Amino acid sequence: MTAPAFERLARPIQKWIRQKGWRELRPIQVDSINAILGGQDDVIVSASTAGGKTEAAFLPLLSQTLDNPEETDEVGFDMVYIGPLKALINDQYQRLEGMCLEAEIAVHPWHGDVSASKKAVAQKNPSGVLLITPESLEAIFVRKGELIPRLFSRTRAAVIDELHTLLDSERGIQLRSLLTRLELAIDHPIRRIGLSATLGDMELAKSYLRPRNPDQVQVIKSPEAEAELRLQLRGYTTGNDGDDGAAIEEVSRHLFTNLRGSDNLIFAGSRENVEIYADKLSSFCEDEHLPQEFYAHHASLSKEHREFVEGRLKDDTKPTTAVCTSTLELGIDIGDVTCVAQVGSPFSVASLRQRLGRSGRREGQPAILRQYEIEEHLEASSHFSDQLRLKLVRSVAMIELLLAKWCEPPRAQALNLSTMVHQTLSIIAERGGASAKRLFITLCEKGPFSNVTPDIYMALLRHLGQPDVELIEQAPDGNLLLGRIGEKLVEHYSFYAVFKTPEEFRVVCESKTLGTIPLDNPFKPGMTIIFSGRRWEILDIDSSTNVLLVRPSKAGKPPKFGGDPGIIHDHVCQKMKELYASDYVPAYLDANARQLLFEARTNAQLIGLTENSIIRISEKDYLLATWFGTTKNLTLEFALTSLGFEAKTWDGVVEVSETEKSPSLLDGLREISESSPDSFFTGKENLIFEKFHPFLSHELLKQDALSARFEFEALQSLPLTFGT
């Protein structure tokens, strides 16, 4: 056993390690034990999926609890584990239960699916480890704010799992605010331990974990060598009429032939695609009279179904392939998988790396990635985006960056005014009222909203108190209270989540809930759908309870699901430009993919894509080859449309057309490069993207958008010469 790190652990923890049959600690665990037990710095533990991160954090933290208990008679949780998914918390509960049983340390899961009786036990006698989601921690603040000091007075550490998913998201800002409020409530700092498999910029990650003291954050990275990687990118084209049915059939048949009989994950992108491919693959099993082993897995399916699929993946006796969205990208324990398949390109290299980490976990076994890309059949009139094979080139670019061990850094911090509205209401609800000064100190001076100035925050508070908003009101003593609308929002269970939760139908067959489908689908009795990888006929629709009653059917098509488009990083688009300009042909491309890459380069050369910044494709139509990522290109699109142009963003390229309302393109680009961002806002644009945006004034929405969704500074040096 590795010494002296092993010897620094508490005796019950050492005993548990021996019982597990471990011959030695992993290097990441040794380094984490020494860092956590050797000081009080915050720590980020970064390692691949199944790299031992959880144990790296909890072995020393539990040892600290046992060997150096708090010298106080007060009760309270010793540490808090915060996970982004209920399923991840359930999984960690099972992993920690054995470790903590040996040490006689209580473990308490706490989220929406945990029974009230179990929460009551934890509340009555808080101790040991609390496993909780950000939303459930929010609920404790709002509903049981007076109990916060008692529940957390002994808390010395907070373990934040899947840190990379929280860095620049609404939930991430919410969590940082909650941790700050927790420290203020108990009047002592809480050590923060971040766990993540993929981080592109450690300095930004350190600033997220401890914004005002990033230098006090230690980074522990796994030195372990990665498994051998085997990969192939296969290309397909649609039929002459643009129908992708035959291509989907080919992809499905290849997946079926190569994955059947083993455990695998197929990341199909959207929930709609998950249903399409799960249906195809399960149909192949039925047609060939084989046992079923292909199952859909996404967030709209019932908890029971998802747990069934996860259980099968962990069962070595039942070959199982899950066709999934990002639901299985995070660190839920599903055992070892042979292969990861990716249909289409993900939106980030970080996601691709995280997904690939599911394969090749056993010693001596390679990690296997099978990627599939479907492009359009080309005609003389084909759109330029099809001629350039943008999807395939992006897939190649992401694989090349994956091989180069690059992934996206977190985005710089924005104002996050929607989340600020949420946290303002939460603090007022927790305390029964609060002064504007206290709110500003808690949220801005000490909390995560450091970019919000006093003037901006006062403007926000004044607007929230307007008669047509009524989120807050001012009491005679000057304190701020919840207004009529604010009370209604806070009283509803949906308040705890800072992100939007769409209204949905519940899909029911013979009293069993299969999952949920967005309400904006135009359903009627007699229609057939594909859901949970199976086909159903709609028998009845109960609009009062939003229930779809269904029965099995032999036909169907997948419903439409919501979802935001992803953000492609600048570096990915710049890698795409390199690929267009070079003659490098990756060895992992199949013959069809090589042909598609050849077509992409040939067509790019014909229009001068890599040599020119502005390409004229007809009298009024142009391509701007910016090689920007999504955010900068959308900023340019926004500016162009405000001047009367028609514009559309693609990977690295903006398609733009002059109209009767617009100036010439050169004049428009010159005006954009010389104008202030404010000049492009007319008051008619849609700036409502997040849950609490509808309660903000247009001026506040504009400031929020400028801080998070636009990068106008990138437009100051736009090229002003035509390509030839």
Image: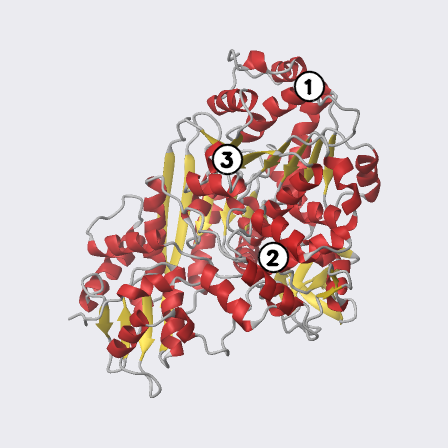
Amino acid identity at mark 3:
Thr
How many numbered marks have been drawn onto this rendered protein structure?
3
| Viewer-proximal residue among 533 and 146 | 146
Q: Are marks 3 and 1 in contact (CB under 8 Å)?
A: no
Mark whose residue sits in front, 3 or 2? 2
| Viewer-proximal residue among 108 and 527 | 108
Residue 516's place in the image compared with 640, above or below, is: above
Residue 457's place in the image compared with 107, above or below, is: below
Q: Could you tell whether 7 is left or right of 674 in the image?
A: right
Q: Which residue is mark 3?
A: 49
Which label sits on residue 66? Answer: 1
User: Is label 2 in a helix, a strand or a loop?
Assistant: helix
Amino acid identity at mark 1:
Leu
* Whole-percent x, y for residue 648 in the image: 38, 71
Q: Which residue is mark 2?
A: 420
* Whole-percent x, y for residue 284 in the image: 54, 52
* Whole-percent x, y for residue 266 in the image: 50, 48
Q: In whole angstroms, how far apart are the C-alphas of marks 3 and 1?
A: 28 Å
